Structures are given as C-alpha cells and as structure tokens.
Amino acid sequence: MSNLIKGNKYEWETVIGLEIHAQVKSNSKLFSNSSTAFGSKPNSQVSLVDAAMPGMLPVINSYCVEQAIKTGIGLKAKINNYSVFDRKNYFYADLPQGYQISQYKYPIVGEGKVSIDFKDGSSKDIRIVRLHLEQDAGKSLHDQNPTKTYVDLNRSGVALMEIVSEPDIRSADEAGLYINKIRSILMYLDTCDGNMQEGSLRADVNISVRIPGEQFGTRCEIKNLNSIKFIKQAINYEAKRQIEILEEGGTIQQNTLLFNTNSGKTKPMRSKEEAHDYRYFPDPDLLPLEIDQKIIDKLVNSIPELPDERKRKYAEDYNLSNYDASVLTADKYVSDYFDSVINSDNALIDSAKIVANWITTELFSLLKEKNIEISNSPISSEYLGKLIKLIKEDIISGKIAKDLLIEMFESKEDPEIIIEKKGLRQVTDTSEIENIVDEVLNENQKMVEQYLSGKDKLLGFFIGQSMKKSKGKANPKILNDILKLKLSKKN
Amino acid sequence: MEFKSINQLKSLIDENKISVKEIAQTYIKKIKEKKDLNIFIYFDEDKINNQVTEIEKLPNHKKLKGIPIAVKDLFCTKNMPTTAASKILENFNPTYESFVTQKLINEGSLFVGKTNLDEFAMGSATNTSYFGNTINPLSNKDNPLAPGGSSGGSAAAVAADLCLGSTGTDTGGSIRQPASFCGVVGIKPTYGLCSRWGIAAFASSLDQAGIFSKNVTDASILLEEIAGYDERDSTSSNVSIPNYSKQLNSKLNGKTIGIPKEYTVDGISDEINAVWDDAIKSLEKKGAKIKHISLPHTKYALPTYYIIAPAEASSNLARYDGVKYGFRADEAKSLDEMYEITRSEGFGKEVKRRILIGTYVLSAGYYDAYYLKAQKVRKLIANDFIETFKECDLILTPTAPSAAFPLNEKQDDPIKMYLNDVFTVPASLAGIPGISIPYGKDKNGLPLGIQLLGKHFNEQEIFNASFALEKDYE
C-alpha cells in the first residue's frame, strides 16, 4: 500500500505529527472543585479560582493526575516521577488568569508508543513524544450580540491531556487510525470519554510534505480539529496545497492554520510575525509534582485489559485475523459485547468468526440506522448468541436469520420464541423437500429438458423455485442434494 | 485613652471594665483625628459599629475579642472593599474572606479599616498608592516623612495608635522596613507559615503575611492566630504552630547570634552601625554568644530579587485585564485596545515598570540569562543561610539602611528606592523568618530598627531574642 501522493512532477510523502487534546474524565477541574459537566448553563460551573479572582490559588486535583498516569501506562510510556507545572502567558478574553497552567519542560509522561492496524493485516508503531496536563480555557461567544463578545468560563480550568506524537504518520488514513487508536485506549482506560462532538477529543495537526528519502519539509500546524473526517479532509487539502507550491518552485511558510469545514480549505490563523512569546516559567503557586513509585505501581495494577491485548487474545483463542480482531476491539463496548456473545454458549467459541461477522455487519448496520450505541443494543448478547447457534444447528437458514435479526431488533424477543410463533423452523425432513422438488420439476418440464441437454446453470433456477415454495425454510444443503439426485435420475 | 498591649485591653474586656462598643468609639475617634496622615484607604464608622454586636456575642475566651486590628488593603475582605491601592481594583468587593483575616475574625478582632500600601505592594515608601501617600505619624508638620513600604499604612496605624495590631505582607521587606521607619514591631514569618489564600498576589514565591504590633508579645499573640496550614494554598506548610506567646522568654544562655560581615555596607550611617553594636553588646550581656559570620552571596540578593519578583508579578497581574472585575476602560474599540487602555490607565507607574521588567526577563532569549540565573543565585543565597545556621541560632542585622526619609525624597529614583530593601531581601529569597524591632533612635529622634533572622519555622527563637532586646527600652 503506497501512501505517496502524485504531483505533476514528483511523488510526495506526507509527514504528519499530531497533538491530541483529550479532556480528562473527572468530575472536577484540574485546579478547582467546579464541575466539568457538559452543556450546563453558561458560567454556572465557575469557582473563584476558575474566574481568577484576586488572591485565588490553584490546588492540583490528584484524581486528574492519576488519570494522566493511567493514560501514560496505557500508551506504554515512561511515567515521570518529577514533573512541573508552568505558566503559559498570553492575553485572551476567555483566559481569566492571563496564563494557562500547563507543563512545559517537565511533563508528567514521557516517550511511549501506540500501534495501528491496517486492513492487509500489517501494523505500525507511532511513537509518542510526551503527554502533559494542562488547563482548558473558557469559551468566547462572538455570535450572541452584534457588538459584544460573551465569555463562558464553564470549561475554564477543565483538565486536558495533550498527547504529542512524533512525525511518524504518513497519510490521512494513518492519522485517522492513530486517533481512533488513542481514543480507543483512553476509553478502555476510562480516562477520557472520547466524545469528539462535545470537544472531549480535539487535535492539532502538524503537516509537511517531502520527496521520499529527503529531509523533512517546513511544516504548518492546523489547529483545533474535532472530527476524524475533518482531520482527514484537512490533511489531504493541506498536503495538496503544499505540493502545488513546491512543484511551482515556491517555499512553504511555517504557519498556524485553521480548517474551514464548509469550504474544505485551510487558511492562516496568524502570521509568524505575530507569533506569541508565551514566557513559560514554573508556576510559583504550585509545587513540583513528585509521584511516589508506589502510586505508579498501584496504578499499573489497576489498568484494565487494553485493545491490543484483547486483539492478541482474539487472534490466538478464536483464530480471528489481526484486522478483524482490531475492528472488534477498537470500541471497548463492541469488544465487551463480542465477549459476552461468545461467553453465552461454549459452542460458540468455534464460531467466533461468524459471531464477529454478525456483529460488525448485520448488527452494526441496524444500530447505525437507528443511531443506537452497542451498549444499548435492543438485541442482547445472549439472544444474538442463540440466533447464531440456531444457524449452526441448521434450525434456520442464514437468510431467515437476517429477517429474524430485524424482528429481534424491534421486539427484543428471544429468537427461539419468534421461530416457534412464526413457524420459521427450517425444513430438514427429506420427504417434505422431495415433494416440493417433484412439484417444481413437474411444473417446469421444459427447463428440465434444457438442463439435461447441458444448461447446468438452470440448477440455480430450480433451487430458487423450490426455496420459494418452502417459504425459505428448506435446508439449502438438503435441497441441493435432493435436486441433483432427482435430476440425475431423469437422465 | 491609650492601650499599651493586647493583654492589657483584653483583661479590661474580660473584667467588663470596657465594652467592645467603647473600644470601637475610642478608635473611631482616634482614626478621625489622624485622617490627614492618609493611613486608611477604607474607613467606615458604620462598618466598625456593625461588627460590635456580633463581637459582643462572642465568649470571652476568644483570644482577640474586641481587639482593634487594621488590615492591609491587599487582603481580600468580605465586608470591606479591597483595592490593593490600585485604580484597577477601585470599588472591588470580594465575596470571600482571606485565610488570615478570617482567622482574626474567628477570634473576635474588631477590624477598624483597610490600610494604605504601595500599589500591589510594589514600593518602599507607600507612595505608589493610587489613593495617595501615607504620612509617617512620627513626622513633624514641616517635614512629612515616608512610613516605609509597602505595608506603610499598617505600620503607621500601629505607630499612630489607631489599632493594637495590623496585618501586613512582606515580599522583600514590606513589613520589616516600615516597622523600622515607624518604630513598631513587624514580623515576616517563614514562607508558607501563613496561607496566601485571599491575598492579592505580588510575587507568589516570596509573598508572606505577617504582623505589626506595639510590642513583641502582641506580635507573638497575633502571629499564632494567623499562622496555620491551609489546603487551598499549595505552598502552605503543614507544620504545628507553637504557642509563641506562652513560650515567650528572654533567656539567651547558650544561644549563638551571627553577625554577617556583608551587612556592613558603604554609605550606611554611623548611627545605624552604632545601634547594631548596641544590640550586639546587649545580647552578649544577656548571655548570648556572638559569632562573626559570612553570607557570601548577599550582594547578589537585590538584583536577584528584582528579577524574580517582577517576573512573577508580570504574570500574577495579567488577570487584571478589565474583562471580569475591577476597572475597565470603556473607550476601547477592540479586545487588544481594551487591554491596552485598561491596563495603561488602571496601573500606576511603578507597577507598569515592574510588569515591563518581569515581561522582559521571561522573554524568549532572555529567560536563561535573567530568570533562570536568578533562580540559581536564589538557591545559593538560601544555602548561605542554611550553612550559617549550622553554627548560629539567629542572625542580627540592621533592618534598613536609613531612618524614615522625607516623603518625596526618592520618588524619582527607583534604584535608590530599591536599595531600601538591601537588608531585608536576602531573608525573603531564602524564605526564612525575620523580625524588625525598634532599637534606638537617630540624631533627629527617629526610630531605627534592628532585624533578627532565624531558621525556617523557628519564629519562637526570634520572638524570644526580640523579647530580650525589647527589655532594654522598657
């Protein structure tokens, strides 16, 4: 699989590094007791500290620190026993302190890595540079009044984890896989709710292009993207923009860009001349964060099974392909559902591949249509297990099973009960099938003759007619055998 | 009517010889009489009278029941506005009470008003206040003198007998120097002893609340009330607070007092050196051992301080932007212009000077040469003290290089003004406790202060030696 982009003159490689801002899942803010609930009335979750009243002081929320450490462990990263909170100084209306408390020189988490999986079964490691804790700013509302800007400080002080990758990503698709993987790990760890629509997970994209093998080009940073779709669009647009400039003999200006989701284009946010000098320095209101190794060890033991481990288990225990396993494990709830289907009946262990297919194709499409999360699936894992067992035992055909699934989705009923009620049980009685076949052959004498004179393809026609007559209940294998036998006897 | 000490007034209250109401009336009258000294930014008779009923309900065992206290207008108070002596906080009414003032309220103190200071505590003469100079109560009419600063109003309030004690804050000498100028006792405790919660910040790593009083005993009584751990201040120390006043004694046997050679500075008057000598002799006579010591990095303290303090201030004062509270210029046409005009008009000259210095030393390209280096030097200075305190219990120095100077003398020369802090700044950088007590007078009869420095959290030792020296003037 080639990631190269064809220009007019050369083939180009896109080089991408991501800074993901993930909101820490925590009831209260990083340095105050205010609530972090989403969607509350503006300025209803603002403490004296969040509003930067005179003499107010930040106090670290130890739960947020634990969440960051857990995330670091999940990213296979080095946890730093010593880290420092710095002030990043700049003025903005929704930044009440006039500085953001962040971590600059000494982040809480150092180098780590995550692996992403491709359809062809291969995978790739993306290296993590660091993860640090910082406060979110408030929100400026420019569209509430023609001449005024309103400020909502509910988000002010909410804890964020900034996860910075090395420039190891080579395409928009890889970027998408990477973000999905990070999101998946955070959700398994329960350290971020992963809700991109509510802004719990946002990303800044650093992007440059080069001819493979050459040095990295000058990069631009696209700020504040909050969906994987937009991230991919922005990357593809920006890569092409840079390639065009370079192929025309121009140079790339290092710049901070914004992506316009309507036009699909990037545009400069501010030029280099206006670049901020943030005057970082250690926040004198806070002591350096010193973390006892015992606390880290305790957290290591509390880490749940992560997607990569489950993936490995699925591959080994159930013989699933790396890609199938990675699709199943990407979302913890999907994976939990899969586990619970398999665990509902020992007989299903050998049918893991079938279970996986039923979940990722049939069930997914029903859920998607009704916009329901799998954790709220109307079809319980136990009933899906039963359904698959019914197929395996030839009690119903695959085709009937699909109709049955829709019925189960609507009625939430046990598939066995539906089958009994509607008489959907597959016909395996050979004499009954023989009767049907005889009828079909009698009614289509001409076709039979044609078949016998060499038109083999007509077998499908006889199967279809017989199946129709049986209302779909005839066991396809038995039907097939009987048909062939009867036709050969006519010869 | 004059009360000499907290204990004296407290016994009168306990014996029902005076009511809280009478105390309030007495001090209201005194404050009105001294109105010309401009000691208070906020003084409201009704606010004082309103407290009386509440205080009278309190049981007598409340240690400060009815004791008149003045509060530096840098402490946020619920019942009185808080300005930090700045236009930018004119008319600011906090909805919260600072840790220190709340503790004083809990013990029944009567707040007589909010005292003047240098704007955001930046200054050494209480002459950078938006609300005008405070005049040292010890001045004569023809020659008004500065009370020192930045807590000049609080020092003057005690000196003019407008209260029995007052709160101050000391970042580089802002309690000790005005105490010296006004002839009162002023203690800056160890950094972290009193919570900074609710005190408008100047330089967070240096700011520390403390006390002015008429005598050492009163200082010890008040400090034990305002000290203590506060989980809302991450730099507050979780140490147990001794009962300073109960343990107060003047025994100096076996104690070693260090006399640092670096505190003999050129241009310091003979009078100050003479007072220093007197104090040394007195301590020796009382049984202490005198040891000549060296604090080799002392000469770097002032430049180090004037990098670190402005750096922190430039960031701490960023919150005063006109967006959320306080003054906002209304003629601005954009957000940037709003900041520009609000902060240009809202801050005075000295505050702006320090914001500029602080912004400069933190800038990309200058950070390492200034801020980072200053932090390293600060460690060396702190280490000087740690090493020295292995061989002595206390250090004795003059508090300030001069007695109170005329009001407008150093107004236009910031460097000269900064030199006022030369003896007080090293202890601030090291975070150690220091006291200034009046000890002798100059030829014009103005008080001169002597400074005692101690080990971290060893305020008791400082109080004891001060208590001993104080007896020379009883």
Image (cartoon, coloured by chain):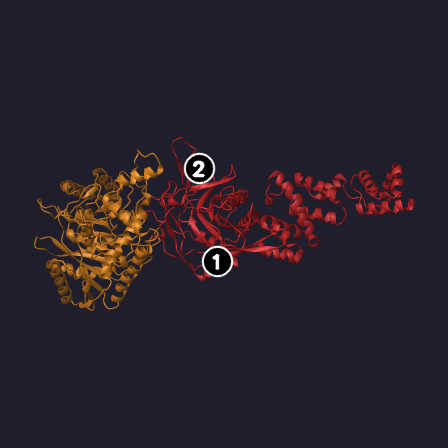
Chain colours: A red, B orange
Location of mark 1 (residue): A111
Task: State the image coordinates of residue B190 (x, y, percent, origin top left).
Answer: 27, 57
**Residue A33 seen anywhere in this rendered image of the structure:** yes
Q: Do the residues labelled 2 and 1 touch (CB within 8 Å)?
A: no
Left or right: B134 as drawn, with respect to B317 = left
Q: Mark 2 lies on which chain?
A: A
Image spot of residue A195 (x, y percent): 52, 44
Give the residue type that dot 1 points to.
Glu
User: Please, what is the three-letter code of the amino acid marked with disc 2?
Assistant: Lys
> A281 above or below B95?
below
Quarter assignment of residue B467: bottom left
Residue tagged 2: A41
Which residue is nearer to you in this view: B223 or B333? B333
Q: Earlier in the sequence, mark 2 or mark 1?
A: 2
Q: Is mark 1 on a helix, strand or loop?
A: loop
- Which chain's residue wears label 1? A
For the residues labelled 2 and 1, the Cα–Cα distance comes to 39 Å
Q: How crowded is mark 1: few (under 14 residues within 10 Å), some or many (20 or more)?
A: some
Q: Same chain for labels 2 and 1? Say yes or no.
A: yes
Identify which residue, B428 or B219, lies in the foreground: B428
Q: Residue furthest top?
A: A146
Residue A366, percent from left and from top? 64, 41
The C terminus of chain B sits in image quarter: bottom left
- Foreground residue, B161 or A266? A266
Q: What SS does tag 2 mark? A: loop
Q: Residue A288 location, x and y as percent?
A: 38, 57
| Pair 2/1: label in front | 1
Position of B62 with respect to A117 (left or right) is left
